[in-house]
Each structure stands twice: as structure tokens, then as C-alpha cells.
Amino acid sequence: MDKSRFSLLLLEPGEIYFEDFSCTMSDEESVKVGNARQGRLKLCSKSLVFEPREWVYPLVKLQFKDCDTLSVVKLSHDVPKTAIKIKIKQFAEMLEENVLAPYKFIYESRDFFIFFHFASAEECLSQMEQLQRASTLHAPEHNSMVATILHSRYMRMVFDPVMMDDFTEEIICELQAEKISPLVRHQGKLALTPTTIYFQPFSNVESSPVLKLKLSHLRRLYKRRFLLRQVGLEIYSAEESAVPHIYLTFQSDRDRDRIYKILEESPYVNLERVHAEEMTLQWQNGIVSNYDYLMYLNCLADRSKNDLTQYPVFPWVVADYTSEILDLNKADTFRDISKPMGALNPDRLEKLKERFDEMNDPKFLYGSHYSAPGLVLFYLVRKYPQYMLCLQNGRFDHPDRMFNSVKDVYNNCLRNMSDFKELVPEFYDTDAKGDFLVNIYEIDFGERHDGSKVNNVALPPWASSPEDFVVKLRDALESDYVSKHLHLWIDLIFGYKQRGEEAVKANNVFHHVCYEGAVDLERVYDMNDRHALEVQIMEFGQVPKQLFTKPHVRKISHRVPPPLCCVEKDAVSYEMECVDVIRLHKEAVTCAVRHGTRVISVGKDGALKVYDMTQRKQIRSVILSNTPLSSCVMVDDNTVAVGSWDNEIYLYDVEYGRVVESFRAHDDSVSCLLWLDKERLLISGGCDGVVRVWGHVGHAGQALRGLRVELDHDVDVTAITYRRRRNEIDIITGTSDGEVFIWDLRTRELAKLCLHTSAVSSACLVLSGDRVVTASENGDMNVTDLSVSHSVYQKHFPEAVSSLCWDGSSVLWVGGGGGALLQWNLVTVTQLNELKAHDDSINSIHFHEETKTLITASKDKTIKVWQLKQVS
């Protein structure tokens, strides 16, 4: 027998196919006349579909709501058996000569006679009459009645163990489920054994009576939201599997979670684990492409190509559809992806905001969504015409409203008061070569107002073919401009600007029904209300699941000017050899730096020491205070600035061995110092919660007069670093309560990050000024992207992290509370090696670029000099 032409897509979305019967159909009371046709009759919840055996004849669809009468007639003069007579007002013919085309609707009353080959006409009539009665009800009552019929059939259905690979297999659980594909929900029974998932459909429309997924072939499992309910499960298997992919929904989230837990804990299942943080980090460092990362985020946010209400969404990135050449080096070529489509046209946005302000709560700015089934199929009608016919009851859209020109569609999205749609991944899928832009089935879509036939999509001048168009759009998606701004679009669609106050600020507010959690269908008991909400969810579109509640990190540009970190360099590490151990202090050494051949150090004994590495002896020693000294920095070739617990800053001349100046810098202990050589500024942090910026340092008696800036904090300032942004400087401070502050030195503008749960012990800037690494006393280390103020990596060490130091390229040294010294690669965020450097906490680490040496100072009263040798 030829393959069936019948498909669930020939039914209305959501319509249920129960069973079929072998029969002959005629519009006369005799099977002997020429127009009698043999075939199969499909019994569905809203219609009867007759599929003739000969493919040249069309399928006939008879809607129950159009039936005047259904009756059994006895035709003894022709055949001894009975038949069902259907008197109908109108009907539709489909797939005549097996050609995909709009359905042919015949608006005339006609009688059809169904002669069953094996079944009883009386029994079939009983089922048809029940469904006909249901068709007279309002949609909610109709759905309820059909669900009751379906449940009754389900209760009578028993999973057939004959279909198992091994009939001795034990069934762990057996549940009602639906197999989901675009616009189609196919009911059935799922049986799970220790080795296999079996799905047995209610009806025979599937190519196999049972679908089998071996647990050993499973690779990925995703919990899915279906029609705003957490009842979906999408399963991906290995390529060699007979069923490489299946999307199932269950009666409740409890059933779904039960199956998920069993599969996740099964010893036969070996899932591929990809953590979101790891994927984001790989994307940020250029390992994962923009296209693959967006596909991953869509998947993570419950977007699937099997669900048109939640189809993957991609951004318009190109705004130029008129030029002969697409110039990806011009900013004007690109759309502003920091704004939603509805906010790109200021005049239109102003009108929308006026309407928004006049609304009662819950307000919405946009009356249509950026992704909905109709919008998806608007783009893909040439590739999936059967989906559009299903969605629009056998019709295509008006020829003038179809996807005829890329330029016209983009312009309409900018100007139309109800068109804000984004794109689908097919626009960037180079493997498919732009096949969705071509009328591959040579369908007659009709003529436009100017008489031209709807055929292939008109492309911009810069595209020579559909394949070329998609390749160039993909190049645009992966371009430096888009890579630099893509995180802003992610914030709108998947991130913190998706909902709430931030969405209002970003002009990104849609109808409240579109948002996850806005409507709990399980608590809507009124059938009419529930049906209305389901229809609205189905037709209007759904906002993706929110993945991020903080600004998304920005992708790191690979074009980094020296001398900042070059991400594109191969990862390096250092072999370390201890070449000198210096024991000068009576108590813990709090800070040590190298300048030329000298090592300058301060300690809790209140002493400043100067050690000459050539002579290998101490050349200066001075007690600056009766209290501990916290930090020191060189402010010129001979002068060192020292911070003290007695609230003073001391300026000491190493060459002449004398204190040049001291001044009261804070109302409490000076905890940390930073020197900006280019600007000649000394920055101090204190336990009084203040950061002060000093000019005129080195001019006797002028330091206090040179106070430039005061930055107030609520608690002790424990760490300071900085970054340069062109001509601007940011001061980055860490505090005793774990917060990190970013201050614009010129404007005093502030950003605050809550990164740690204990005091920040150290901070240093790395990777082209884009990231800051902070460490805390409880052993946490954070890598934070400053461009979006968002943590991109976290690591916890068993002991406190007391100090950090960066080599200016890709290596970070981490000093531990127990004296351990670790090397980390900041590009891959992986530990390179670890050694026991001291017997107690490492209080400071200093990298000397010229000599490639590392100076470590410890609580164990020693300073060590390490010679570094770079290795690949």
C-alpha cells in the first residue's frame, strides 16, 4: 500500500485523531457507480477525513459542525450491509493529485455515503454522533467533552508488551503523554523500563506502532514549558539512535519531573553536561560563536523548533537592505540591538508610550509579540507550507501580506504600529543555504496588487543568491560590532531587562499573559476563561524563560591593543625558582615591592626595610611607627609612600634614608595604597570608610593641600585597584562587607556590586581592562566583567585568599591563607600549578616586569624572590 497522504497537519491545531476505518465513499446510494472510491475514513474530534486509495483523488474533509444529519441507511438492493449517510452543508478537498495547495472549499449541500468494509456502521455512527454533539458546544465545553472521550479511550488502552525488545523487561512507570511537533499534539502512552523509553501512539498515524529510545543513547534532557505550563520534556539521543529526538508533554509537572528524575539517575544514561556558566565563558572568550550561543540560550529558555509558540528567536542585526555592498565595518550597517524592535523608531515609540501611559494595569507597550506561530510561519511558509495551511484553516495569507521582500519586511517592522517581529534562526543557518527564501514546491501563492506572482523572496542588492544572503547575514552576526553589543540584546530577550521595572525603562513591555508565571492555568477553573487564555498564549506568543537577572557579560574582543592582555595569545605559564629568601622583619611582612635592584618592605613591626638584591644585604631600616605598617608603593625612583595603622602616610627617601614628609591621611588606619604614575596621584583607602586621592605627592608640605577627591563608603576599605577607559579613570574598591565599588574619578559616578560574603582581601584588574578579579577572606575568588558589572566566574578555595597579582598577560597568581601560591590562566580560567611558597599567609605579591621576578611577602616574616621562566 502506498504511504498515507493523511497527516495531523490536515486537522485544526489541537484536533485529535482517534482511529480510522477501511471503507468506500460515494455521493450516491450505490457503490457500483463510477464515483465510488475505496480508501480509509479518519475519525477525528472535529471532523471526518476520507483518504482515497488512489492519490489522484483529493482527500475530503467533513466538519462535524457542518453536518445536518448523520444516519444509518440500509441499502439491501445493492449490498446486504448498512452504510452511514452524511448530509452536509459544505466540505473541503485537499491534496488533489497529491499537490500541496490551498484547500478547495465547496459551499454546497451534499450527501455522502460511507460503506464500511469491516466495522459496524451502527457502532461508528454512535461515535460520530457523540463528536457531532460536542461540535455544537462552545470551544471550552467542546474541549472538555473531547478530553473526557479521550480519557475514556486512554483508560481502556493498555501498553502492548509485545512491542518491547524484550518482553521480560520490567515497566518502571506507565504514563499518559503527548508527542509534540509543530502545531500537532499526538496522544499516547509512555512506558519506561530500566533500558528503554517506549511511546505507543493512540492512533496509527506514526510510521511505527511504537517509538523506542534506548537509555544508553540519550545525550541531553531538557525540561520544557509548554503553553506556559511546566509539563514538557525534550529528549535528544545519539545520531545512530532510531529516534534521535522527541518532545513529550505530560499531564502534570509531577509526572514530567518523575520521568526526568528516573532518567537522570539511571545508570544506563550518560548525559552530556554543559553548564550555563561554562558556555557563557566559552562564548565570551570566542570559543563558541554568536549563532551557537544564541541557539543555546534559546534552548535553555524553553525555545524549541518543535513548538511554534516558542520557536527560537534571533535578532535583526543588519539595517542596510539597499546598498550594493554590505560593509560590515560601518556602524550604520547595523541595527541598534540595545533596543527592542518597537523602540527603534522614535516617532512610533512616542505614540506607543502615550497609549501605555493612558492604560490601566496591567499595562503593555506592544500589542503584538516579536515571536508567535503566525510570525514564524510568515518567514517559513515556503519551507513549511503545510504548517501555514494548518494554522490558517487551509489558506495562505493574502499575497500582498506575505514575505515578499526582505527590505519591505524590515521597513514594516520599523514603521507599522503593530509589527515588532524579530527573526528566526534560518536567517543565519548557512547549512540550509537559505532554502526558506525559495518557492521550492512551486506553490501558487497568488498574485500581488501589481499583478506579479508571489514566488521567491526579493533579496537586497548586496546578496547574489539566497545562500549568499544567509552567509553574509551570518558574517554580520559574528562581526565585531554585533559581538560587542550582543549582550545588550540578550538582556532584553533573556535577561534582566525582560520584565519588571528594567523592562519599563528599556521600553520592552508586552502583554502580561506572555510572561512565565503571569498566569497559572491550573488555577483557572472557568472553562471559558481558561480556553481564552490558552488561545491567547497559542496565538500571541510567549516571552522566553528569564535566564539572567543581572546584566549579561560582554564578549571579549580579540583585537586588543598592547600592552594590555592579548587574549589571542597562546596560554602561558611560568616555571618558578626561589632565588632569595629575605628575613628582615620581626613580625609579619605586610607588603613588599621591587624597584630596580632593591626590595622595599613594610611589616607589622612598624619598620620599613630596604634590601639590595645585588649585595644581598639590608641597606636601610627605619621604624616609622609604633603601630603596624599596612602597605607601600614607589612614587618615584627614590621615594616610597607607606600607609600606617596610626592613620598616617609616610613619604620616605630611600636614597638619603630619611622621612620626607608624613601627614594624617585618614581618621582610622590606612589600609591600602595605590599609585597612578601617569597622573602622579596617590590613592589611599582607610578603615574610616574613605578613599582619598592625593596630588602634589613628593612636594614637601604640599600633600594635604593636594587632596583631590574623597569617596565615602559605609565600612572599611580593604582593597584598591583601577582601570583606564580612554581618558577616564575608574577607581575600584573592595570593602570589609564584601562589596565592590566602581567610581568614575572625574564624575564621582558610582556602581556597586555585591560579590562576596566576607571582607575583600585583594583586587586586581586584568584582561584589557574588562575584568576585575577580587578575593575574599572566606576563600572566594570572583572574576567580574566591568562592562556589564556581572560576575562571570567564581571559585572557592578551602582557605582564605589573601593576595592577587597579574602578569599583564594571561597569568594570575593567587596567594593563599596557608602559604600556597597558585598560578591561574585567566583566558581559560583554569589552574596551571600550585606550590607551597610560605609557611603562613601570603600578604602581598608583586610582579616585576623587567626582570621577570615575583616578590612574595608573608605572615611568616619572610620575603621570597622568585625567578620566572615563561613556558607555553
Image: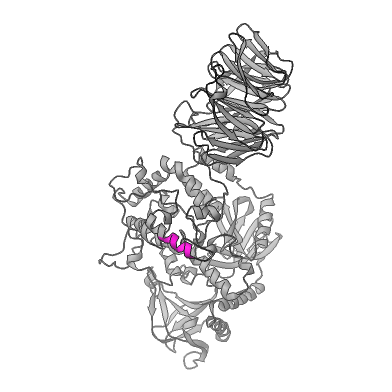
Residue 355 lies within the magenta run: yes
Q: Position of residue 708 (x, y in %)?
A: 53, 29
Q: Position of residue 41 (x, y in %)?
A: 50, 77
**In this rendering, is residue 456 above or below 693?**
below
Give the position of the C terminus as an image quadrant.
top right
Instruction: Out of 152 and 666, give the one closest to the viewer.
Output: 666
Residue 378 lies within the magenta run: no
Q: Position of residue 429 (x, y in %)?
A: 43, 50
Q: Which residues are magenta?
A: 351-359
**In this rendering, is residue 721 above or below 81?**
above
Q: How many marks?
A: 0
**In this rendering, is residue 502 above or below 68?**
above
**In this rendering, is residue 271 above or below 106?**
above
Instruction: Out of 118 and 135, give the one closest to the viewer.
Output: 135
Q: Is residue 516 left or right of residue 432?
A: right
Looking at the picture, the colour scheme in use is one colour
Q: Residue pushed farthest bottom?
A: 77
Q: Is residue 422 visible?
A: no
Q: Is residue 308 left or right of residue 104?
A: right
Quadrant of residue 414 in the image? bottom left
Q: Position of residue 620 (x, y in %)?
A: 65, 9
Quadrant of residue 670 in the image? top right
Q: Main secondary structure of the magenta part?
A: helix
Report the residue at 39% width, 54% height from top: 346
Q: Is residue 186 visible?
A: yes
